[in-house]
């Protein structure tokens, strides 16, 4: 089974991409395991970690507790022990760290996809959406992404000049989940 981690600086389009991915998968079941929130899709056997369509400015794993990694690992281990095989997809800062990525690489076929954007386009997006994220916070995430880039193999998608549909299609191709998405007919 595959695990797909989507990383990138704030504003590059990770949450938008994940919302489009979730819509393409169809009706899922919003679920909870301790502090972990996720959407489970039984048709394509995919779990998307995080909370989406909440109406909040920040979604995905940004809505989860800072200590959610232990719960995520426990949950995924329990699924594997029960023989329930699901692909796992997630984005954002909460779960993109060495502890969780190392666990995933030992239990799944891990793909890390880095979403990037031209700096001027990025600033325009951030200004347009508005944010309460400080420059210091954004710089910490940028440094973290740079460190992960040095430690792990990953594929890069530049969202600067692509529309949402093109970013989505590139993500599905690069993630290795194209068969699952095509199978449900929302390609």
Image (tube, rainbow, N blue to C red):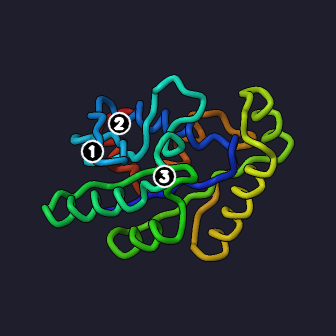
* Residue 140: image location, x then y, percent: 73, 58
Total numbered labels placed on residues in the image: 3
Q: CA distance from mark 2 to mark 3?
A: 15 Å
Quarter of the image where one finds residue 44: top left
Q: CA distance from mark 3 to mark 1?
A: 15 Å
In depth, the one of 22 and 144 nearer the eye is 144
Q: Are marks 2 and 3 in contact (CB under 8 Å)?
A: no
Q: Which residue shows up at 35% across the image and 36% down it?
A: 25
Q: Is residue 44 above or below residue 175?
A: above
Please tell me whether mark 2 sits on a helix, a strand or a loop. Answer: helix
Q: CA distance from mark 2 to mark 1?
A: 7 Å
Residue corresponding to mark 1: 44
Residue corresponding to mark 3: 173
Q: Which residue shows up at 70% across the image and 41% down it?
A: 11
* Residue 186: image location, x then y, percent: 38, 33
How would you rate the neighbour count of disc 1 (Cα within 10 Å): few for under 14, some for 14-19, many for 20 or more?
A: some
Residue corresponding to mark 2: 25
Q: Is residue 41 above or below residue 156?
A: above
């Amino acid at each position: 089974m595959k695990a797909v981690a989507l990383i990138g600086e704030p504003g590059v389009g990770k949450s938008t991409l994940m919302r489009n991915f979730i819509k393409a998968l169809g009706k899922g079941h919003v679920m909870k395991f301790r502090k972990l929130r996720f959407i489970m899709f039984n048709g394509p056997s995919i779990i998307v970690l995080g909370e989406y369509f909440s109406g909040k400015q920040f979604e995905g794993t940004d809505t989860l507790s800072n200590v959610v990694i232990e719960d995520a690992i426990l949950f995924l281990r329990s699924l594997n022990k029960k023989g329930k095989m699901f692909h796992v997809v997630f984005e954002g800062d909460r779960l993109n760290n060495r502890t969780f990525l190392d666990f995933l690489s030992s239990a799944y076929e891990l793909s890390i996809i880095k979403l990037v954007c031209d700096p001027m386009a990025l600033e325009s997006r951030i200004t347009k959406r508005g944010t309460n994220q400080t420059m210091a916070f954004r710089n910490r995430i940028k440094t973290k992404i740079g460190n992960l880039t040095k430690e792990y193999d990953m594929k890069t998608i530049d969202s600067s000049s692509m529309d949402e549909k093109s970013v989505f299609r590139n993500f599905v191709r690069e993630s290795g989940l194209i068969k699952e998405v095509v199978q449900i007919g929302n390609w």
